[in-house]
Amino acid sequence: MSNALGRFVGRADRLQRRVPPVAFPVAVAKRYGEDHGAWLGSLIAYYGFFSLYPLLVVFVTLATWLLRDRPTTLQRVLEALWSKLPFVSDELSAEVQQQVRTMSGQGWVIAVSLLVALWGSTGVVRVLQDTINTIWGVPRYRRPSFFPKLLRGLAIIVLLGTGVIGTAVVAAITLTVNLPLVAAVGAAVANIVLAAAITFGVYRLTIATSLRTGDLLPGAVITGVGVYAVTLIGGLYVKHVVTRMSGIYGPFASTIGLLAFVSLSVQVFVIATEVNAVRARQLWPRALGSDLGPADRRAIDLTMQREALGALDESPP
């Protein structure tokens, strides 16, 4: 039985290597496992989930301050923000806005709160930088040290904040369009393009090695489309699950949904980054068994280089 199974696996392996539409996803999945992509994505999602509330407070505070004389525009921007986070319950959005109103008029409280929130959010971008460089096989000694990494992290936060503002503006504009189909298609295209551009900017800010633009574009596009799809799924979840829950269980459904939204979005990003690395480093087709090919040896060399140089970098002098 084992010989028959081995022959079957061997034939399937040879077949999948000759079919690029099959070989490439197999290589991405295998590299995802070798890089512990699920664990890396979960780590980003963990920090991201707990950084989400402070970032919401920061965004709502800045929007309230900038648009305090235009309440209608402010309301549209906030509605657009909540639409980008479909799992956010009405209770959470009301709590955020109430906290911001409580802080209004106390400049030093707002300044301190924003600094604390921004400092907390740098944790997720530091983990994000390590994750992307790990996927690309960048040795630890070539990665930015603490302060350069912190500066890059702040730049990423500004980029993400700009993206949130941009998507909110796009959503607010589409709310004023009287043609539902045109508004829906325009909003979808604009959000995907904007998310892809933000992802590309994150790649440029985080990867500590020289890469061509063409090496980064596929993952950026995949992230843009994937995150938008997750957002649509989130809207269906809210419509068919959260709105039907009672007042007691509704917050639990919203929290679980929000955590799932962050986790799925991060996993889409990690897989898209793996697609870039596998494509650029020519890490495909990969073997299913022990009959290793050139791509398998390149993958092993890349992992050994990353781990060996990292270990040497961390060893005492």
Image (cartoon, helix red, strand yellow):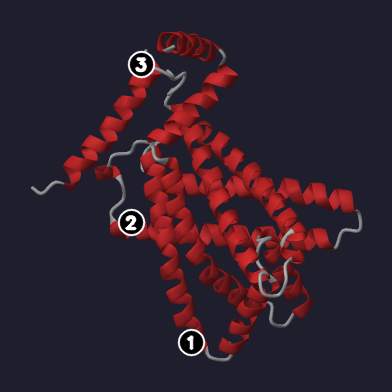
Q: Earlier in the sequence, mark 3 or mark 2?
A: 2
Q: Three-letter amino acid code at disc 1?
A: Val
Look at 33% across and 20% down and name the residue there.
Answer: 297
Packing grade of label 2 (10 A; few <14, some 14-19, many >=20) is few
Q: Which mark is residue 290?
A: 3
- Residue 48 in the image: state x and y as whole percent: 49, 60
Residue 211 visible in the displayed image: no
Disc 1, SS: helix
Q: Looking at the image, do the residues carrying marks 3 and 2 touch, with CB atoms under 8 Å apart? A: no
Instruction: Answer few, some or many: residues within 10 Å of disc 3's Cα (few below 14, many 20 plus, some between 14 and 19).
Output: few
Q: Residue at x 54, y 52 (%)?
A: 263
Rounded to the nearest angstrom, the CA distance separating label 1 from label 3 is 61 Å
Q: Is residue 214 above or below residue 170?
A: above
Q: Dot 1 surroundings within 10 Å: few (below 14), some, or many (20 or more)?
A: few
The residue where tag 1 is placed is 109
For the residue marked with disc 3, what is the amino acid?
Ser
Picture coordinates of residue 185 (x, y %)?
Answer: 81, 46
Q: Camera-side residue: 247 or 317?
A: 247
Residue 121 versus residue 281 in the image, above or below = below
Image quadrant assignment for residue 173: bottom right
Q: Nearer the viewer, residue 166 or 257?
A: 257
- In the displayed structure, would residue 98 be above or below residue 75? below
Disc 2 from disc 1: Cα separation: 28 Å
Residue 140 appears at what percent x and percent y?
27, 44
Image quadrant where residue 256 sits: bottom right
Q: Which residue is mark 2?
A: 148
Q: CA distance from mark 3 to mark 2?
A: 42 Å
Which quadrant of the rendered structure holds the N terminus?
top left
